[in-house]
Image (cartoon, rainbow, N blue to C red):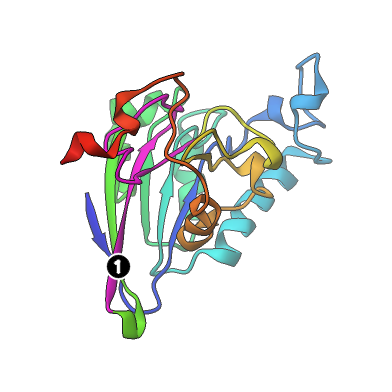
Amino acid sequence: MKITLNKGQKLWFTSDSHYNHSNICSSTTQWTDPITCREFKSLEKMNATLVDNINKKVGQDDILFHLGDWSFGGFEQIELFRDQIICKNIHIITGNHDHHIERNKDNIQSIFSSVNKYLELTVKWNNGTLGSDEKSFILMHYPLASWNNMARGAIHLHGHIHFEANKRIGVGKMMDVGVDGNDLCPIDMFRVLFLMKTQPIKSMFKFDHHEVVEDYK
């Protein structure tokens, strides 16, 4: 997929909202390890915070990529969550808890701009007097050890792991954009680019020939 950002338009990434997931909320959980929960006095407060944090940052005409695990608590929660978000352009990369969306129950995919399990995204934007610029992203709910165009600097964004903020950046140009490591908020593309700028081109494997730029010559 190729996207060109319009003047004033921003691109955002997020993942693992788990809207209406009672077990991830400290006040309603049945999990035995509360350290994995979000500290909220009620499930309703958690839900409202997730919605407010998106709407405070992501404008109506901005673009939001959600990398999976959208909602919990029944099929109807999918649209209920979506209806509260003002952004008109939401693309979803499905996660392991998004089976209703993947099956397109009652044509639920129509409430999103696109639905994919994996996406290679190229974003182009105007860079002022410097002309235009572009960047490639590899989007998937699950973290990948190696990915297409890694040697060319493509950035892999994922969710699923619920990393804390100090662990969200991987060994190379990869990052967990899930809400739990990003103050329960989406993160904008330019912030991602800033965080990835000094990250090496490196795979999780001890040696991966896809790290070598010469392979692309």
| Residue ID at (58%, 27%) | 161
**Residue 80 % position (x, y):** 50, 45
Instruction: Judge left or right: residue 148 versus residue 31.
Output: left
Q: Is residue 186 visible?
A: yes
Q: Give the residue pinned by disc 1.
A: 133
Q: Is residue 54 above or below residue 147?
A: below
| Location of residue 10 by image quarter | bottom left
Along the line of sight, the residue nearer the viewer: 204 or 126: 204
Along the line of sight, the residue nearer the viewer: 129 or 212: 212
| Residue ID at (27%, 34%) | 148
| Location of residue 210 by image quarter | top left
Residue pushed farthest top? Answer: 32
| Location of residue 167 by image quarter | top right
**Residue 190 % position (x, y):** 48, 62
Along the line of sight, the residue nearer the viewer: 190 or 43: 190
62 in the magenta segment: no
**Residue 57 % position (x, y):** 56, 65
Q: How many marks?
A: 1
Residue pushed farthest bottom? Answer: 129
Q: Is residue 55 above or below residue 206?
A: below
Q: Residues within 10 Å of mark 1 (few under 14, many from 20)?
A: few
Which residues make up the magenta segment?
131-158
| Residue ID at (46%, 18%) | 206
Q: Secondary structure at mark 1?
A: strand
Q: Is residue 133 above or below residue 39?
A: below
Q: Amino acid at mark 1?
A: Asp
**Residue 185 % position (x, y):** 61, 52
Q: Is residue 105 visible?
A: no
Along the line of sight, the residue nearer the viewer: 104 or 194: 194
| Residue ID at (33%, 86%) | 129
139 in the magenta segment: yes
Quadrant of the image containing the C terminus: top left
